[in-house]
Each structure stands twice: as structure tokens, then as C-alpha cells.
Amino acid sequence: MIRVGRCHYTSLLNLSGGSMSSAREKNNADKRELYQSRRKSGICVGCGEKPATASEATGRKVLKLCEDCRRKSLDSQIRNRVELKKEVMSHYGKDGNMLCNWEGCNIEDPDMLTIDHIDNSGSAERKKDKSHAGTTFYAILKRTGYPEGFQTLCHNHQWKKEMVRRRA
Ligand SMILES: [Zn+2]
Ligand SMILES: [Zn+2]
């Protein structure tokens, strides 16, 4: 579906595909095969040793990982998400630090920081396109070499900026 008048940053999404080298394709094919054979025999696709088990928390019927590997993968997912956010917030932060860019603001808690379009038209734009926040968006920013036009702001100052814009 093509939306007319969509934010031009959506085009960043298209850069995220990229073409794979054939060596990488081969590697991926091998991995897929290994994955499938483990899935079929009901052993963990992670370690290939222990039996895959259902998660007690989610009760999911699809068994892929053993208890240990699931925990590890969850831990590393969370760690990776946090690391990615810190990296992006630092890149766009004040003087390359993980800091809100607003003058005099010292907010450095990544939970309170967010990426702001420097010249966007505000929250209406953001609501239209959810990809402007969250892990997927941060990953795109990183993968596309940190394009210009963004800055780190704390949630309060993003709101403040919006208020100032509306009054203008
Ligand atoms: Zn395992
Ligand atoms: Zn701030």
C-alpha cells in the first residue's frame, strides 16, 4: 500500500533490505537446514543438545529452544535492545553523549530519552508512522549510518518543543 504524502523518513525503511552476498546466502541456507533438522527431531535449535521445551510463561506450543537457551536468548535480546538504544541516544545526544539536547537539560536516563525529528511537523507525523520510535527505528538509524535530521530529547522536552511549535 502506498500512502500519499507519507513522511520521507519512511524511505529509510527501504534501505534496510540490501542485497546479500552469495557466501552469506549459502551460510544462511546451511543454518536453515540445521535449524529445520533440529526442529524436526525436537531438540533445541540453539544448542542442538537439550530437548526443546514449552515456555511456562507463554505456554507456547511451538517448541524451539531448551529452557537455558530461551533464557539466554531473552536476556541477550533485552541487552541488545538496551545497548542499541544507548548507542543511538548517544550518537544524537548533546556532544555525542547520552543526553537530552535541550539547553540546560541533564536528563541522561535512556528510559526517558527519545529521538526527535529536528524539523518535523510534530506528533501528527509520529502518530501516522509508528516506525519513528522503538527498536526497529533505532536499528534503521544505525544501519543507515545515522542520517542527519534527528536529535536526542527527553520526553518532557519533546513535548515542550511541540508546545512551542503549536504556539508559534
Ligand atoms: Zn538449548
Ligand atoms: Zn530534556
Image (cartoon, rainbow, N blue to C red):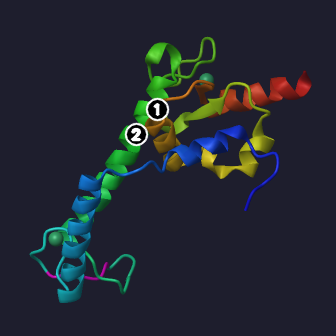
**Nearest to the observer: residue 140 or residue 168:** 140
**Residue 125 x/y as whole percent:** 76, 42
Query: Do callouts 1 and 2 mark residues in contact (Cβ within 8 Å)?
Result: yes
Q: Which residue is mark 2?
A: 84
The amino acid sitting under disc 2 is Leu
- Relative depth, front residue between 67 and 49: 49
Identify the main secondary structure in magenta. Answer: loop
Q: Quadrant of residue 159?
A: top right
| 107 lies left or right of 128 | left
Quadrant for ligand 2 reads top right
Residue at horizontal 46 percent and vertical 30 percent from the top: 145
Query: Which class describes the residues within 10 Å of circle 1: few (<14), some (14-19), or many (20+)?
Result: many
Q: Which residue is mark 1?
A: 88
Tell me which segment is drawn in magenta: 51-55
Looking at the image, residue 81 sits to the left or right of residue 108; the answer is: left
Q: Quadrant of the N terminus?
A: bottom right
Dot 1: element: helix
C-alpha span from label 1 to label 2? 6 Å
Q: Is any atom of residue 28 visible in this view?
A: yes
How many marks the image carries: the answer is 2
Mark yes or no: residue 66 visible: no
Queried whether the magenta region covers residue 22, the answer comes back as no
Q: Is residue 147 left or right of residue 56?
A: right
Q: Amino acid at mark 1?
A: Val
Check residue 54 for magenta coloring.
Answer: yes
| Residue 95 image position (x, y, % from top left) | 48, 13
